[in-house]
Image (cartoon, helix red, strand yellow):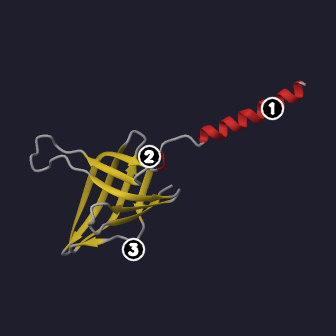
Amino acid sequence: MRRCFKVISALLIAVLALSLSACGSEADRFVGTWKAVPGTDQSAMGIKSDNITITFNNDGTYKKTERLSFMSIDSDTIEIGKFEVDKDKGTVTFKPDTDPDDYLAPDYEFQYYYQITDTYITLENTNGRFEKMYLQKQT
């Protein structure tokens, strides 16, 4: 009887551990550093965007670095802010931090449809603009 109790207890613990490991939000899948896959950057209006890196943090914040090229002029940009994932809609929304005193930079946000695996994210702009990013998780 005692042996049977130990076996049943071990099975219950294993089932509980497996069920808890499946818990977690969709945003947890984004956490980490993702870098644009070489040769897959998309250009719009003659502006080439490459060398994109996005780091998603556990606290719902992100940092995006990007090199923009236009007419042989390169510019590095850094964007920080908060992100939200809506699994039902299949979207991720970026809400960049802005200076509250800067009337030229009102609150704005960018929303993308996403597809995510353990190693890749595809982000496609929801507003109809031609913008698509293919990112690979960095280890």
Rendered location of residue 102, percent (x, y) = 11, 45
Relative to 100, is 119 above or below?
Answer: below
Q: Earlier in the sequence, mark 1 or mark 3?
A: 1
**Which residue type does callout 3 highlight?**
Gly
Which residue lies at the image location 66% right of the left edge and 37% below the top edge?
17
The residue that label 2 is drawn on is: 27
Circle 1 or circle 3, nearest the eye: 1
**Is residue 1 left or right of 68 when viewed as pictured?**
right
Rendered location of residue 63, percent (x, y) = 33, 49
Spatial CA span between label 1 and label 2: 35 Å
Examine the image and state in which quarter residue 11 appears.
top right
The residue that label 3 is drawn on is: 39
SS assignment at label 3: loop
Spatial CA span between label 3 and label 2: 27 Å
Residue farthest left in this picture: 103
Which residue lies at the image location 35% right of the left edge and 66% below the top edge?
132
Q: Earlier in the sequence, mark 3 or mark 2?
A: 2
Spatial CA span between label 1 and label 3: 54 Å
The residue that label 1 is drawn on is: 8
Circle 3 or circle 2, nearest the eye: 2
**Which residue type does callout 1 highlight?**
Ile
Rendered location of residue 74, percent (x, y) = 22, 68
Q: Earlier in the sequence, mark 1 or mark 2?
A: 1
**Which residue type does callout 2 highlight?**
Ala
Circle 1 or circle 2, nearest the eye: 1
SS assignment at label 1: helix
SS assignment at label 2: helix
- Which label was assigned to residue 119? none
Which residue lies at the image location 34% right of the left edge and 57% below the top edge?
112
